[in-house]
Image (cartoon, rainbow, N blue to C red):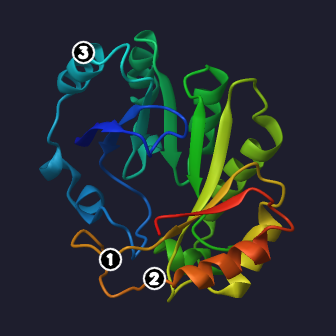
Amino acid sequence: MFFCGLNKTTLLDYPGHLACTIFLGGCNFRCPYCQNKDLLLHPADYAAYTESDIFDHLTKRRGILHGVCITGGEPTLNPELASFIRKIKDLGYLVKLDTNGTHPDMVKMLYEEHLIDYVAMDIKADPKGYAASAGLPKQDDTLFSKVQETVRFLMEDAKRPGFDFEFRTTVVKELHDEATFQGIAEWIKGAPHYFLQSYQESEGVLVPGFSAYPEAALQDFVSLIKPKIPSVEIRGV
């Protein structure tokens, strides 16, 4: 695994818990608005930490931090992920996994072995617009079928007490509109938590030049979604 970043303390990444966030390199999507292009394109060059560095920090912060967020890139690409998380759990931490949902078997295994306590899954767009938002060839629906499988698992089968999940969409003016959120709301209706995250331009964006909606427009999307997903909120404004 390429350990490309470590946010040593965060109140934002794990709902309700003081946590740290570990950034793993590598991804199978090429979302043009991705904020972490170096983690996608050159993960080996940005591997700033070793596993020993990570566990030195986690050991020192036991009793202060309560959770560990594992993000990317796409963490589920790593076959060593389960053994890595198992070591984190042995230290007594809660674990939150951020994922694009393209490896449902990995998510299911981590869940069944009680290695994850919270999943935050990206919903890139409605089904019709998924390829463009994820940077995939339009004719290739293989990865999207995996995304659908992960959504079904979280919605229908992940019922263990103490486990929770959310869906979230980074809202980009050039890629998302009212029809997008009508389609998403129908697709994941009844989800326990759904967040709209406002796009932010930065030096790390894979394809610069996208823009964010004003907050009023995001609120309009929330109103559109609420009849099917009552717990929908805005982040990042």
Q: Which residue is mark 3?
A: 60
> Which of the pair 10/76 is nearer the observer?
10
Secondary structure beneath disc 1? loop
| Residue 52 falls left or right of residue 196 | left
Task: Give the quarter of the figure containing the N terminus.
Answer: top left
Residue placed under numbered mark 2 in the picture: 212
- Secondary structure type for disc 3: helix
Direction from residue 127 to residue 48 in the image, left or right: left
Under mark 3, the amino acid is Lys
Badge 2 or badge 3: first in the primary sequence: 3
In the rendered image, residue 94, in percent from the top left (x then y), is placed at 51, 24
* Tag 1 near tag 2, CB within 8 Å: yes
Are there few (<14), some (14-19), or many (20+) residues within 10 Å of tag 2? Answer: some
**Could you tell me the amino acid type at mark 1?**
Glu
Q: Which residue is mark 1?
A: 201
Question: Which residue is at 79% across, 65% downward?
Answer: 187
Residue 93 horizontal/vertical position (percent): 45, 19
Q: Are marks 2 and 3 in contact (CB under 8 Å)?
A: no
Q: Earlier in the sequence, mark 1 or mark 2?
A: 1
Residue 13, x across and y down, in percent:
45, 44
Drawn side of residue 175 relative to residue 224, left or right = left
